[in-house]
Image: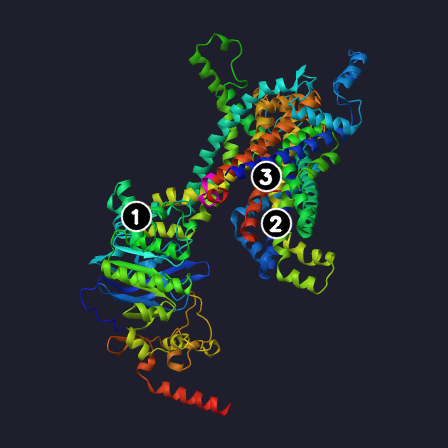
Amino acid sequence: MRALVARRLLQAVVIVAIAATATFLLVQLAPGDPLGDLVTNPRVPAEVRERLRERWGLDRPVHEQYALYVRNLARGDLGWSFSQSRPVAHALVDALPNTMLLMGVALIGAFVLGVATGVVRAARRGSVADRALGAGTLFFYSMPDFWLAIMAMLVFAYWVPIFPTSGMTTAVIYDYLSPAGKLLDRLRHLVLPATTLVLLLAAIIARYQRAAFLDVATQDFVRTARAKGLTERAVLWRHVLRNALLPVITLLGLALPMLVGGAVFIEHVFAWPGMGRLVVVAIAARDHSLVMAIVILGSVLVTLGSLLADVLYAVADPRLRLHAR
Amino acid sequence: MTAPDSRPPALLTVRDLRTYFRTDAGVARAVDGVSFDVMPRETIGIVGESGCGKSVTSLSIMRLIRPPGTIEAGSRVEFEGRDLLALPEPEMRKIRGNRIAMIFQEPMTSLNPVFTVGEQIAEVARVHANASRKDAWDRAVEMLQLTGIPAPAQRATEYPHQLSGGMRQRVMIAMALVMDPALLIADEPTTALDVTIQAQILELLQQLQERFAMSIILITHDLGVIAEMAQRVLVMYAGEIVEQASVGELFARPHHPYTEGLLAAMPTLGEARSRLAVIPGTVPPPTRWPAGCRFHDRCRYAWERPERDHPPLFEVGPAHWSRCFLAEEPQRRTQAKDASAIAGGSA
Amino acid sequence: MMLVRWALAIALSAAVAAAVGRLWARMGAGGGPWGTALARLRRDRGGMVALHFLLFVATVALFARWLAPFDPNVQLDIINLASRPPSVAHPFGTDIYSRDVLSRVVHGTRISLSVACLAILLSITVGTAYGTSAGYLGGRADAVMMRVIDALLSIPRILMLLAIFALWGRVSLGALVLILGLTGWFATSRLVRAQVLSLKTEEMVVAARALGARHRRIVWRHILPGVTSTVVVAATLGIGNVIILEAGLSFLGVGVQPPTASWGNIISDGASNVAGLWWMSLFPGLAIVLTVMAFNIIGDALRDALDPREIQPA
């Protein structure tokens, strides 16, 4: 097991290194100045500009810049955000927990809903329930994230105003709330963005889960379980599901890129102060170092996610568990 | 149709069992009017090529047929005096794995890969005897010991993929016998195993049959296994029983041309493989059984009558039935032999 | 007058759908994996409804100029007609500049659909070439090529796109197609490679090689036909993804640039006032969802019919 984790960690490092290099090359290839708006801003004195260039090594040859970039990355120095007027790392540290909260809630909700939907569909294959859930799954699967967010906001924040439209807390009032009131306020703000993400991700998971479940349900050991005199429920929920959950673990690795993408749009629509919103703001400001840092962080998240999925898989599947020992 | 005599009290009585699968390609009559009895402590063999309906017969007895398959109305399966096909599903579940148990051909895929073998055996005791977790586990270890697995307590904690093929089949047997069933259905129990292991498993089954005083339905395509294990044989072809007799009678005086073919195809020690007689052609698809005798297009004796009429089972000897018009026109057999001898001679 | 034109468009798309159905039936009679797949597709009611709908959308895209009641970019009457909810004259309402939203959605269909189709064409071409090369070459080259794909797949596509737009700023339609196409082939190449690896060992190819066939000939005659079904399914399922992606980018203001209408930027125009301009989000959004759904239904049906294994969208 330890060998497996070590091997996968090494692979992850290589992947992230390639991704970071690709990002660096992208910046080099791009037109315009990495200093972004500061170059065109007439109020910034030329002298300051030169000092910044020197400070960030922008006046040196490409390979030296690359070496510097790698060294800084390795030290966790992500550069200076011109639009935020503070180190990139500080901006990320503020935004990351908010995104993690949203993504964490969405991930758990989506897996529960998606697996349940997929299993119900597979267990009642061909029934009205299967077809209705299938149509619903396809509907959400075919939907742009931002549009579902807008529709949710339209219906549940404007037409039937039971949830707030944006932010994580109610401005001003929040400070005067009791601790319980504060928690409630945060939860109310979480409902719409999280539900939107849950529905979108659950649709993807349900599609996979149904296929995985049907695949397992035709295997010989299911017949053995029936021949033992188990109830249909025990056969499906114990024998089939335990096996059908294995491929879903792999989905964890696939779900993360989708979650990151969804977070960008949903945070933007609901003004949720996370990384997704930060990146949209950074693009508008052409704040290259901030954008690049978020891209690299995103790929680190995704790589860690797939690593975690592999390890979980090995824990859940006795065949791999013993191999990995 | 002449139904076989039932010397009461039979443990299992199957009458006119028909299991059809309604598919896009038409209705597949996988089992089409099968009747037989199983006596207490008896081993009955069912032989036939793959696709003849022997496995579907056994799954029908267990009522494990999945859609689109259905057991047709009018079929009857009586076990210990109860009509299994009329039982509500919860009652039927109390019989499965308890009074009737089953083992399958592929011990690798027939065991759940994510549970230990101990858990899988113990599950039977948990379900049928309401045993506590501990009692069920102890019972599982005891069963593993009975099936001759060394270090059973250790093996119980292992997963199927850690065991050899023969060991896995022993686990399947242990799982089947937890509740001391009256009837064990063994569906090709040794086909996937290599020859030495086959012999061990068959011997184990014989020992355990003695010990548990149970009946066995042994399904196989291997007449050698039948000769070693069974007292009576049913030969199935195209969803029907075509011949039924005691083992001695069947091997000494096969009546149905299909049985003749199977016996001729049986390899005997020291015989070169090239001399194996093979029945020409293949089993037709179950959606399109031939009219008349279902075997006529592969039969060396076929004449107009079996092409037109469907033969019933004829009593051709003591407790010996055959679904062939040769029972009424035995001269055709010798004529055909003479003809082929002449043809062979002139060639 | 407008109604007659729309009726004609519906009739035309129905006629084309019927003709396609007949063609499929004829090909189905021919047998083979594609024939059986098409015959099955024709019997699939959901698939046929989806096909009808897509042909209708394609007709709208093709004849946008005749079907749009107004010029999509003309401000009709900024004083009296701005931000009007749906009415008989303007079934999808008007935007803050008094432009007719239906006309913008109709013209947006043309843009969104052609961007998506061209981008997916580019994606599958590059992906097939890369995947075939990796799979056919094998060995070290294959290992390196696939590790690169792993890395590229580890960057969420939306972040990669946003990074590109952050660096390059607003881009032309051609560049948008290029960028969408060149960021969408990684998964396809992996899929194609797997298929090529299994084809490579098949007797046909082995025999061809033994007979001394040239590499180019083996690839064109034996390998590429074997990956067609995989690629077609991936492309069909992938179009939906690209439509959604383009809409998202246009929504964020970095995709299709105003005043050119695309489904995404119409929604973006209304997003500043979601409650007051709900028709600007609702109708283009429905256009996206229904079109993407239709592509996914056909993609699913094709996958079921052609290949039981999972094919992921491009």
Q: Label 1: chain?
A: B
Q: Residue at x 48, y 77 (%)?
A: B274
Between the residue at mark 1 and the residue at mark 2, the CA separation in whole angstroms equals 44 Å
- Magenta stretch in the rendered image: A315-320
Q: What amino acid is labelled 2 in the image?
A: Ala
Regarding mark 3 in the picture, which secondary structure is present there? helix
* C249 versus C119 height, above or below: above
* B293 versus B100 height, above or below: below
Residue B215 in magenta?
no
Say left or right for C83 vs A205: right
Q: Are marks 1 and 2 on the same chain?
A: no
Q: Are marks 3 and 1 on the same chain?
A: no
- Is residue C131 visible in the rendered image? The answer is no
Q: Which mark is residue B140?
A: 1
Q: Nearer the viewer, residue C179 or C117?
A: C179
How busy is the neighbourhood of tag 3: few (under 14 within 10 Å), some, or many (20 plus)?
Answer: many
Q: Position of residue B240 (x, y in %)?
A: 34, 69
Q: Nearer the viewer, residue C184 or A325?
A: A325
Between the residue at mark 3 and the residue at mark 2, the CA separation in whole angstroms equals 27 Å
Q: Which mark is residue C194?
A: 2
